[in-house]
Amino acid sequence: MFQQNRLNNEITLLQKIKNLDYILLISVIFLSIISVFVMYSTDGGEILFHTKNHFIKLAVFFPLMIFVAFFNIKFWHNFSYIIYSLVIVLLIYVSFFGIKASGSQRWMDVYFFVLQPSELMKIAIIMCLAKYYHRLKIENVNSFTSITIVLSVILIPTILVVSQPDLGTSILIALSGLIILWLGGVKIKYFIYSFITFLISLPFIISFLKPYQKLRILTFLDPDRDPLGAGYQIIQSKIAIGSGGLDGKGFLKGTQSYLDFLPEKHTDFIFTLFSEEFGFIGSVGLLILYFIIILRIIRIGSISRSNFARLFCFGYAFAIFIYIVVNLSMVLGLLPIVGSPLPIMSYGGSSMLATMIGFGIVLSAKINHKQMIA
Amino acid sequence: MIKSNSGIRKTDVINRRMFIIGAAKVIVFVAIIARLFSLQINENKKYLTLSDKNRIREWRLPPTRGNIVDYFGNVIAGNLKVYQLHIIPEQVENFNYLLVRLKNLLNLSDKKIAKINKLKAELKPWDSIIVSENLSWSQFVKINNYLYDLVGVKPVMTISRNYPFNDVYTHVLGYVSQPNEKEILDNQIIQERFVPGMKVGKLGLEKRLENHLIGTNAIQRYEVNAYGKRINQLEHQKGQQGSKIRLTVDTEIQKACGELLNEKAGSISVMDIYTGDIIAMYSSPSYDPNLFLFGISQDEWQLIRNNPLKPLINKTLSGLYSPGSTIKPIVALSALENNVIDTKFKVKCTGKMELYGQTFHCWKEKGHGWVSMKNAMKQSCDTYFYEVARLLGVDRLNITAQKFGLGKKVLGEYFDNEKKGLFPNTKWKKNNLGRGWVLGETLITGIGQGYIQSTPLQLCMMTAQIANGGYAIKPKIIVDSNPTSYEDAKQSMESGLLFDSNSDSLLDKKLFKDKKNIKIIQEAMFASTNERFGTSYKSRIDDPKYQFAGKTGTAQVKRISKRERELDLELEEIPYKDRDHALYVAYGPYINPRYALSIIIEHGGSGSKAAAPIAKKLFKLIIDRHELRNKQSNFERITI
């Protein structure tokens, strides 16, 4: 056992490169290329601010992903708690000294770009809980202490992010955490009880929501109640997607987007533009690409020897899945509008940084899939 | 080992749990694809429509009015390219500087500048402001020369109504201008097609035929962005020009009428005695309808409005005049028809006639001596007609006059300013003035004075109906889809039967009891013009080709006092307002007649001096154009 460890530790750079998961890599590269073209379309067929910046971010974060991948998975295991604590510190820092924009305080200036720590928390919480369940004895999974600890680990960042306020990201953080609980073996009945409790307490939760958040829920239930105000985004989004048809209006020909009917087309509504221009075929193609990425991550998880790597991969695969589902359901009018970006496709540095780090750790798990962690 | 065991067990738990959510993932993905399918495939049409509704906006342009042409196809109300100047505020760099430049270039008033600034504040920055609706060519060239310095200025070419003959047809055609609120609300078609800058008929045929002339809007489709800004033009759908309308009028004759009435107040009407076609209908003075197209200036309007010759009144249709002696053919006819007199009946004219202590004067102070009907008509002896009217009575006279169209509208529905005039009878006076008829009133009615009022067009129609042998005609100014040819009309009249062109039913339109009587009147009118001592003998044309028969009239506008009668003032010595109206009705050529006319010169003095000479000049032209007109009669048939 010890020998094996030593063997794995001595993997050469060449072997590391050889052991990278190329299906995952190619899929990510492919997705990145698509995202640049779509960004080019949001700029109205010109290389403007968004296209340029998106490309630069990809050019920086993609190598970063490889860099992350070259660290042994054990390294990421060892630093999980520290990384989690660091991001918590950043969240607290942001809540005091963060940059305010459009009514919320969730960014900090780190000289070369504006960082949103809550996006990093999406990864950090998975790492932290994966390590916790990796080390936790199976008998203690359902013990009161352990459940209290993990719930605190989830609740602290969630509350910090909700108070920014940023409901969308906090829900994604909470869901990412809860999935590790699920994978770790917390009794199914607890999930069922909590879900029932959640449903019962929903009216109370709603009463605590900010007026604009309540409005979003009302708008979701009936977008036509205020078609030029609160319902505008979702109505225009549905028009854009619906008018795309089978094969779309064509690249750079999405009228809804280039005539400015689509709001937030660079970020949360990027799929709308894609779907308008490339239609049902393009949309399903994009979903398949995402599905391949998710399946690949699950596959890497299932060949991993360590439960940390396995939990991280499964958790991260689920998180990516949740991001996509929440974003798509939102733009398709299946869920209320909560700010949630589409991984890689949406404009936004922090989200891309977190996603790339996630892929990096997954790739590290692939390179070191035989690695055991004590 | 224990650790590794628990590790393995844990791995199983993780894998099992993973499998459960894996299945859930597939279901959710399928659900999302189903949603995409429903939006993009099932409801594609609906959303495509909504998307087009978002991005496509229509701009309607003013419709192009139909042309109005004369009988020969000459355009008398057409459309002309006009040059306009627009400003697009968002393209302007320095708005105030631009306004100063334009002010200097186009001599804009301060008021206009203030208006432009107000419009700029009200409109969206990409909506164009119309600075000038109608630039002259020189202004347009000037603007184009300085265009490099006038960023945001757009010279535009558009179409506007134009009356190429200026004032010649004003009272027939009317004019167009911006519609007011009431006109938009009252007319469904205007309401549907209204766009700023559109012009509608305000008067005359332009107003009456609005729904035929208006045309349909051209539509421009633009792609707009979310803020309503035009991005690019998608389509230009041409509008349909309004219907072309052909009138019965002859521009050459109409123009001649205008020249003959130059500087005079009055009216000339010319009519085809068989078809009822109005060949000319001119009211003088006239004014230029082109002035009204872009809003008439206050100065020009005041000039028209305050002209003492009253150019705004369509004298042909709305001017009411005592017919004076021009009524005498009808009085004589009525008396003949009612067997009150015959051709041998004579009256001794001593220059005046006494009745119940009142004196009724003949125009000739010395009197005409013994006169028969023919002589009385020829010399227009008033005493004779006093006596005939006395014998006939106003009620019997009224019946004949009504038959010949007096007291009724001639063109009916075409002109809403047409007056119906008045031919009195005893009942009318009782009903309207509450007093009984006095015999003296019958006497003056017999010479066309008193209550009697007629329009120039009525007198023209009356003459036409005597000229055609005593048959009713239906005057018209628009060539209808199935015009009755002159030969058909004449033939059916002579066979005594007439077709109503509207209902195709056989009508008896004979206006006489004995055809001989009409002939007698025609001969008397011939004598009046072509025999010595006839009142219009000086204006005769001996050439049978042009020879015409007529009757003069001099209508008093004011009672002549004894002193004035003794003075016997020359025309120039009488104040303009008190001078008599000069009238003349005639038809020709005497052999085989075709046309009738009526001439009225307001305050022109005697009919024989002022009005009859005009007829002489006009008849030559009318008859000369007769052949041309005949050839043209099957030129084209236009349905309206």
Image (cartoon, coloured by chain):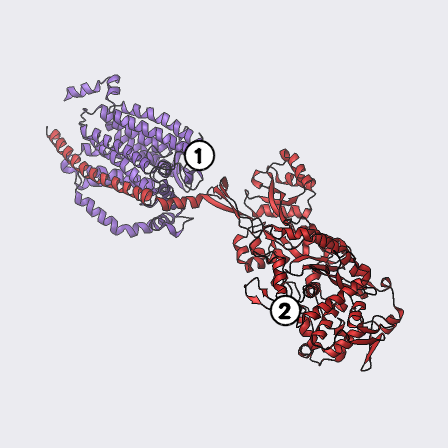
Residue type beneath disc 2: Lys
Chain under disc 2: B
- Residue at horizontal 20 percent and vertical 47 percent from the top: A193
- The residue pinned by badge 2 equals B510
Residue B326: percent from the left, percent from the top?
A: 75, 67
Q: Which quadrant holds the N terminus of chain B?
A: top left
The residues tagged by marks 1 and 2 sit, at their Cα atoms, a distance apart of 82 Å
- Snapshot quadrant of residue B139: top right
The residue lying furthest to the right in this view is: B567
- Res A270 seen here: yes
Dot 1 and dot 2 residues touching (CB under 8 Å): no
- The residue pinned by badge 1 equals A44
Residue A215: percent from the left, percent from the top?
A: 37, 49
Left or right: where B434 falls relative to B554: left
Left or right: where A6 falls relative to B347: left
The 10 Å Cα crowd at callout 2, few under 14, some 14 to 19, many 20 or more, is many
Residue B539: percent from the left, percent from the top?
A: 80, 59
Q: Which chain is red?
A: B
Q: Which chain is purple?
A: A
- Snapshot quadrant of residue B174: bottom right
Chain under disc 1: A
State the residue in front, A366 or A3: A366
Residue B200 higher or lower than B40, as above or below: below
Left or right: where B223 falls relative to B104: left
> Marks 1 and 2: same chain?
no
Label 1: element kind: loop
Q: Which quadrant holds the C terminus of chain B?
A: bottom right
